[in-house]
Every structure is written in C-alpha cells, then in structure tokens.
Image (spheres, helix red, strand yellow):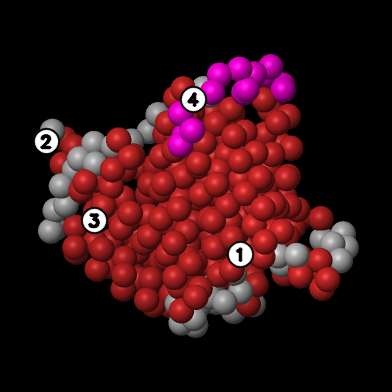
C-alpha cells in the first residue's frame, strides 16, 4: 500500500501543478497563491478539528514555522513557470534543484542534518539527469528555468522544517502551520505585488470548479508524504515519487498540447536512470555505514 501511496504522491504533484496553473490563468500568480493557501488551510483545519488536536497549545522554536513561508515561494515559482515550459520540464528542473540542494546539505550537514560527503561517482547520475532535463525543455525561457530549479531548493528546505515540526507536534498540526503561515505571507505578498490583478480579473468565480482544488491536493501531498517516509526505504520512496511525477507530467503535457512528445519521454527516462544511479550509490553508502 505504501508503495502505491508513494507513486500516488508523484502523480498528485503533477496534477496539482496543472490545476494551480489553471487557477493562475484565471486570477494571476499572487491571487492564485492566496486562494491555494485558503483552500488548503480549510481542508487541514477540518482534519485538525476532527482529531481534536490543539495546534496552539505549545509553541516551538520560531524557525520551525518557516516551512509555510518557504512553501509560498514554491507555489509562486510553480505558477510563474506554468505555461512557459512544459509541466514535465518544470518537474524535472525542480527535481534537479532538490538533488543539488540535498547534496549541499549532505556535504556540510546544514539545518542539523547528518554529514554525508559528496562522492565523485554521483557526477555520472547528475550528468544523466542534466541531459534528460535539457531534452525536456521545449522553450528555454530563462525565468521559467530559474524558478523551476528554485522550486526544488524551496521544497527541500520546507520539507526539512515541516518534518522537524511534525516530530514535535503531529503531521496534521505541522501541515496546519504550513498553510496558516503560508497564507499570511501569501496575503502580504499579494498586497505588495499583486493588487493590480484585481483590476484585470475582478475575482469572478470560474465555472471550472476543479481549479480551486490545488490547495487541497497540496495538503494531501504533505500528509501522504509523512505517512510513507517511515514505512519504506528512501530509495524506493524517491524513485516512486519521481516516476509518478515525471511520467504523469508527460501524460498531462500530452493532454494539454494534444501532441505526444518523444523528447519528454526520453528525457524522463534519462532523469529516472540518473536518479537510480545516485540512489543506488546512496544505498550502498548507507549499507556500509
């Protein structure tokens, strides 16, 4: 069951990016980010109330609550990249950002994580990942490439902070704080940068109701990820999530553009092989230690 949930997580990420992209087209980047956090917060609040948890009963170190603030950047970056390059490329570049950030954190033991020195052998896997990503970029728009890579950086940092908070509280409480802090930051950013969006969109309700479910999907992704992390190995978790992400992204791209892209499929395979190489090296390293 946990293997299926890991695969489902990756698929949900692809669907979420596409749905949030539709919301962005309707309302703009900053308005959409606020709406996403509102719907996600409502969903998580219902879960917290159902379990009768008290998220405000204990306050932990302030920096542990920054996961939601960083998560706002992730949402904004996804929304900025959507429509400029393919969903497959967005997800693959995000994975590349996660890989590089993870290597740096491992190398120096940042954010209280254990140190795992970099192995030159991993350059083989990184090269394959890079080649796969390069083949998947159908339109080299520098802004989209940069922000897609940045989503991976934000995801890693946000995930570590949320996980640390979850160990001190609960998965639901940590997710609740992720969305309530995220909503505060998203609202502030909207008033600073996105007020002009009201002039053009007038916040008219869209008949495409599905575009409002991105926040709920995001909350489900966080909850499912926390369920699976402790149940299966990191090797299979990362691989299954990636397979779900990239190949469902290829399918979504095909549905949106009405065309099949061999480049995206080949790129996805190259990234998967590169990821497998690095994960196998990591797996052998952990077995020796």
In 3D space, how far apart are the residues under numbered discs 3 and 4 (Cα atoms)?
A: 38 Å
Tell me which label, 1 or 3, sits earlier in the chain.
1
Region in magenta:
49-64
Q: Mark 3 packing: few (<14 Cα in 10 Å), some, or many (20+)?
A: many
Q: x, y percentage for residue 69?
A: 55, 47
Q: Residue at x 66, y 46 (%)?
A: 183
Q: Residue at x 64, y 19 (%)?
A: 54
Quick one: SS at disc 3? helix
Q: Mark 1 packing: few (<14 Cα in 10 Å), some, or many (20+)?
A: many
Q: Which mark is residue 60?
A: 4
Tell me which label, 4 or 1, sits earlier in the chain.
4
Residue at numbered disc 1: 79
Seen from the viewer's position, the closer of residues 57 and 270 is 57
Residue at numbered disc 3: 277
Vertical comparison of 212 with 237: above or below: below
Quick one: SS at disc 4? loop
Q: Which mark is residue 150?
A: none
In 3D space, how far apart are the residues under numbered discs 2 and 3 (Cα atoms)?
A: 17 Å
Q: Nearer the viewer, mark 4 or mark 1?
A: 4
Residue at numbered disc 2: 288
Q: Quadrant of residue 29?
A: bottom right
Tell me which label, 4 or 2, sits earlier in the chain.
4
Q: Nearer the viewer, mark 1 or mark 3?
A: 1
Tell me which label, 3 or 4, sits earlier in the chain.
4
Tell me which label, 1 or 2, sits earlier in the chain.
1
């Amino acid at each position: 069951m946990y293997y299926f949930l890991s695969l489902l997580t990756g698929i949900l990420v692809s669907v979420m990016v596409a749905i949030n992209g539709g919301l962005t087209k309707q309302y703009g980047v900053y308005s959409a980010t606020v709406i996403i956090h509102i719907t996600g917060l409502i969903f998580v609040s219902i879960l917290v109330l159902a379990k009768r948890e008290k998220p405000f009963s204990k306050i932990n170190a302030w920096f542990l609550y920054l996961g939601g603030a960083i998560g706002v950047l992730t949402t904004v970056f996804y929304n900025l990249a959507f429509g400029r390059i393919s969903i497959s490329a967005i997800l693959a570049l995000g994975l590349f950002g996660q890989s590089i950030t993870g290597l740096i954190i491992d190398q120096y033991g940042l954010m209280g994580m254990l140190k795992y020195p970099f192995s030159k052998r991993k350059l083989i896997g990184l090269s394959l990942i890079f080649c796969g990503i390069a083949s998947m970029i159908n339109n080299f728009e520098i802004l989209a490439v940069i922000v897609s890579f940045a989503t991976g950086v934000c995801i890693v940092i946000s995930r570590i902070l949320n996980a640390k908070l979850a160990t001190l509280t609960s998965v639901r409480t940590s997710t609740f704080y992720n969305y309530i802090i995220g909503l505060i930051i998203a609202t502030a950013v909207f008033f600073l940068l996105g007020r002009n969006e009201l002039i053009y969109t007038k916040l008219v309700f869209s008949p495409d109701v599905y575009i409002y479910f991105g926040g709920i999907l995001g909350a489900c992704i966080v909850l499912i990820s926390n369920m699976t992390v402790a149940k299966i190995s990191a090797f299979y978790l990362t691989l299954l999530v990636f397979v779900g992400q990239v190949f469902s992204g290829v399918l979504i791209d095909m549905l949106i553009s009405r065309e099949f892209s061999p480049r995206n499929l080949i790129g996805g395979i190259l990234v998967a092989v590169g990821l497998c190489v690095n994960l196998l090296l990591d797996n052998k390293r952990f077995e020796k230690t």
